[in-house]
Amino acid sequence: MVCRKLNIICILAEDGLQALELFRKEIPDLVILDQYMPGFNGDIVAEKIRRENDQIPMIAITSDDEAVTLLEKSGFNRVLVKPVKSRDYESLLNTYLE
């Protein structure tokens, strides 16, 4: 796992609602969301997070290249389209967590 390799503590959510609840409890250094999740999709979670915190970096991951514009408008700093190469993912994490 990339998080272990980079010595990053990751908190995982099973759905969009849990992601939002965990964000409010933990205030992470970086938020990474998939677009298509049960409960709330990534764009909805991002909009809610942005209303509470406009500084935290957020990365979206999606397999739907047609969702990129929607995700960018939702407040994500970066949008990655699957498949994502491990080295690109690691580089992006290092950029936002330095």
Image: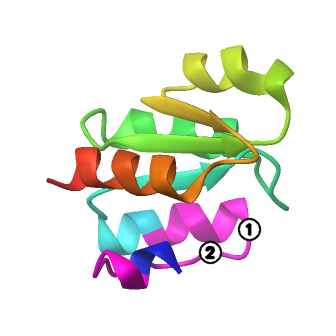
Query: Residue 8 lies in magenta, yes or no?
Result: yes
Kind of residue at badge 2? Ala
Where's residue 41, x and y in %? 76, 46
User: Which structural element holds mark 1?
Assistant: loop
State the separation of the CA atoms marked 2 and 1. Answer: 6 Å
* Residue 15's disc number: 1
Where's residue 84, x and y in %? 65, 48
* Residue occupying image coordinates x 40% and y 85%: 4
Where's residue 51, x and y in %? 41, 34
Rendered view: 42 above or below 50: below
Looking at the image, residue 88 sits to the left or right of residue 63; the answer is: left
* Contact, mark 2 vs mark 1 (Cβ under 8 Å): yes
* Residue occupying image coordinates x 14% and y 53%: 98
The residue labelled by disc 2 is: 13
- Residue with the most extreme left position: 98
In this view, the residue in front, 64 or 41, is: 64
Kind of residue at badge 1? Asp
* Residue occupying image coordinates x 67% and y 36%: 43
Q: Looking at the image, can residue 76 be seen?
A: no
In this view, the residue in front, 9 or 86, is: 86
* Residue 7's disc number: none
User: Which structural element holds mark 2?
Assistant: loop
Kindly indicate the quadrant of the structure image that contains residue 82. Answer: top right
Query: Residue 19 lies in magenta, yes or no?
Result: yes
Looking at the image, residue 73 sits to the left or right of residue 3; the answer is: right
Q: Which residues are magenta?
A: 4-22
Disc 2 packing (10 Å; few <14; some 14–19; many ≥20) = some
Q: Looking at the image, can residue 96 be seen?
A: yes
Where's residue 6, x and y in %? 31, 75
In this view, the residue in front, 35 or 89, is: 89
Rendered view: 37 above or below 13: above
